[in-house]
Image (cartoon, helix red, strand yellow):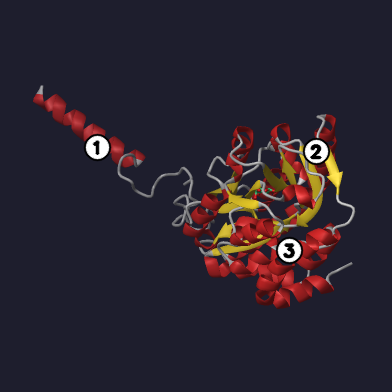
Amino acid sequence: MLRKKVLFMVFATILIVLTGCGSGSETSSGSNANGAENGSENQGEERPQYTFRLAETHPADYPTTLGDKKFAELVSERTDGRITIEVFPSAQLGEEKAAIEQVQLGSIDFTRVSTGPLAEFNDEYGVFSLPYIFDNDEHVWNFLRGPKGRELLSSIESSNMKGLAYYSSGSRSFYSTEPLESIDDIEGKKIRVIQNKLNIDVVEALGGNASPMAYGEVFSALQSGVIDAAENNYPSYYSSKHYEVAPYMIRDSHQRVPEVLLVSKVTWDKLSPEDQEIIEQAALDSVKTQKEEWAKYAKESKEKVLEAGVTITEVEDITPWQEAVQPVIEEHGEKYADILEAIDEARP
Ligand code: GTR
């Protein structure tokens, strides 16, 4: 009996060693969700394999998510499947602020976020939250593609993240549970803003009360009356269903805050220069897809909200809005003087 027991234990031990189970050793052939190498370091010629995670706040069919997926597909193709990037849509890995924090730490490898919340992590990005500084999308892209736009993308390296590419995001306008016909209707309204200090100043200069809040909480806050209004572009207004509870929109286009694809510096520093180049190029190449999808979705989402009976007021004269936010530009403009100059020069 005892002999049998000893034999069994020896056999079990051999099994554990062979399969590498239960020891926490690095012999596992599976991929690590945090992008750790798959233990192929010592296998001669073989190059490391990785599985990375990308956090996305929007649902699977949203244009930014389709951009992320294109990015992942290109990386996989160009590395013959050695590098897999798993896209987690619908804020499965957390709301944007939390996702950015995790990217800083390296516990999430990539994220696609708005430059709005990013301003709290790198001051320079605050410039995009300054109101009415861009005339249209062409103006935004002229700037982003120019030297200052590129420089801004890499400026994020100081906060342990690296910008890979910008994505389109249209322009943001206010919408409310109550009619919004002019700037006077902003007065006294409790308005949700992206969590960044500059947004508070913008809304307060327009007469509203700013309420910084995570994106995922906005629908129920509008529905329950915790807030009266929010602001966003057509695609987000539609896909988040905010239009169902806040069916009055006024198109003042106060901000054009680009989206950005980020990689953690922790992840970046693990990669060989060749892999870094593949990833950087794939991100830039995915922009085309994201922009095409954006154009389609922006048109469809405007149609869909109109069909649903939303009232959209176009602002005919933007001057009173611009005048109201002048103190914000004066207060923060100086710090961004050189960037604002480049934005001015990029005017088409
Ligand atoms: C959207 C943007 C999201 C998120 C959201 C928000 O336009 O694409 O990344 O920032 O706005 O208002 O929080």
- Tag in front: 1 or 2: 2
The residues tagged by marks 1 and 3 sit, at their Cα atoms, a distance apart of: 71 Å
Query: What residue appears at the point 75 percent right and 57 percent down from the top-left corner?
Result: 256
The residue type indicated by label 1 comes to: Thr
The residues tagged by marks 2 and 3 sit, at their Cα atoms, a distance apart of: 29 Å
Task: Residue 344: name its quadrant.
Answer: bottom right
Which residue occupies the foreground of this view, 215 or 140? 215
Q: Which residue is mark 2?
A: 301
Query: What residue appears at the point 76 percent right and 47 percent down from the top-left corner?
Result: 185
Q: Which residue is mark 1?
A: 13
Residue 318 position, x and y percent, is 85, 58
| Disc 3 residue: CB within 8 Å of ligand 1 | no
Q: Give the SS element for disc 1.
A: helix
Earlier in the chain: of badge 1 and badge 3, it is 1
The residue type indicated by label 2 comes to: Ser
Q: Which residue is mark 3?
A: 325
Residue 14 as seen in the image, left or right of residue 104: left
Q: Is residue 255 above or below residue 64?
A: below
For the view shown, which residue lies furthest in the top direction?
Answer: 1
| Disc 1 residue: CB within 8 Å of ligand 1 | no
Which residue occupies the foreground of this view, 336 or 121? 336
| Disc 2 residue: CB within 8 Å of ligand 1 | no
Task: Residue 59: name its quadrant.
Answer: top right
Q: Give the SS element for disc 3.
A: loop
The residue type indicated by label 3 comes to: Val
Which residue occupies the foreground of this view, 293 or 179? 179
